[in-house]
Image: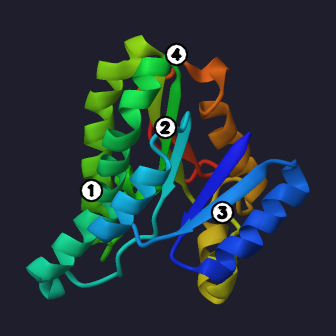
């Protein structure tokens, strides 16, 4: 397997590429680009047009009061958390369809099922992506291209550790009694990217230790 990593930080990309090769043996190349910008998306699309698997994961917009949300904030949120994924899908789908194999996974958030106060920017943009995936996934599955979403809850990342007491409160609300691990989340993502997941179409899978109390 050949892996291409994309991020804004060259230093972090270099470190991640080294870790990937050391742990998996997979060759890892990287592209420093800002996917919230058109030029960044174009650079990545040009370099990755022939890929078989696409996983998108962009950070959320800032937490803000609704009264503070000017149009520019909405535009930035849609660029970062909606249009970036949509344009990458448009870039890679033709090749996947022609080769009759493709897996696309978007990492969004459990907030699309259980909205969080003051995260209107993130929730609205991610719900837009969820709706888009629900439609386009059913258009292309006949070509053995499966598109789905993964919804992380409280996962023990470096970001969560930085939150200190806030993280402790979040973890305390998880029915499993702990935070999820990156390995657990990664295993779910790897399955959705596998040949075995070809009959899973347009779904949004929560990885949250039972945090979202949906009945269906």
Circle 4 Cα neighbour tier, 10 Å, few/some/many (<14 / 14–19 / ≥20): few
Displayed quadrant of residue 34: bottom left
What residue sits 27% from the left and 59% below the top?
125
Of the residues tagged 1 and 4, which is closer to the observer? Answer: 1
Query: What element does badge 3 sit on?
Result: loop
Q: Which residue is mark 2?
A: 104
Q: Which residue is mark 3?
A: 155
Residue 135: percent from left, percent from top: 26, 29
Residue 89: percent from left, percent from top: 36, 42
Q: Which residue is mark 4?
A: 199
Question: Which disc, if any, is residue 83?
Answer: 1
| Spatial separation of the CA atoms under disc 1 and disc 4 | 26 Å
Question: Which disc, if any, is residue 15?
Answer: none
Quadrant containing the N terminus is top right
| Spatial separation of the CA atoms under disc 1 and disc 3 | 25 Å
Res. 124 visible in picture: yes
Of the residues tagged 3 and 2, which is closer to the observer? Answer: 2
Residue 158: percent from left, percent from top: 69, 77
Quadrant containing the C terminus is top left
State left or right for residue 195 relative to residue 130: right
Closer to the camera, 13 or 139? 13
| Spatial separation of the CA atoms under disc 2 and disc 4 | 13 Å
Circle 2 Cα neighbour tier, 10 Å, few/some/many (<14 / 14–19 / ≥20): many
């Amino acid at each position: 397997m050949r892996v291409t990593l994309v991020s804004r930080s060259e230093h972090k990309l270099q470190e991640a590429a080294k870790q990937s090769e050391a742990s998996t043996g997979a060759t890892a190349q990287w592209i420093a680009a800002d996917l919230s910008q058109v030029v960044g998306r174009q650079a990545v699309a040009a370099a990755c047009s022939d890929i078989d698997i696409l996983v998108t994961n962009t950070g959320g917009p800032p937490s803000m009061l609704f009264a503070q949300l000017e149009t520019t904030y909405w535009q930035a949120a849609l660029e970062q958390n909606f249009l970036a994924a949509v344009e990458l899908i448009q870039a890679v789908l033709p090749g996947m369809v022609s080769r009759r194999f493709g897996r696309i996974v978007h990492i969004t958030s459990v907030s699309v099922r259980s909205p969080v106060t003051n995260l209107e920017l993130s929730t609205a943009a991610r719900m837009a992506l969820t709706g888009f995936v629900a439609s386009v996934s059913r258009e292309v599955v006949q070509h053995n291209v499966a598109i789905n979403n993964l919804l992380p809850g409280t996962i023990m990342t470096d970001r969560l550790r930085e939150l200190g007491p806030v993280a402790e409160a979040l973890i305390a609300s998880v029915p499993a009694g702990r935070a999820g691990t990156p390995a657990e989340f990664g295993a779910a993502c790897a399955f959705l990217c596998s040949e075995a997941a070809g009959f899973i179409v347009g779904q949004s899978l929560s990885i949250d230790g039972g945090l979202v109390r949906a009945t269906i």
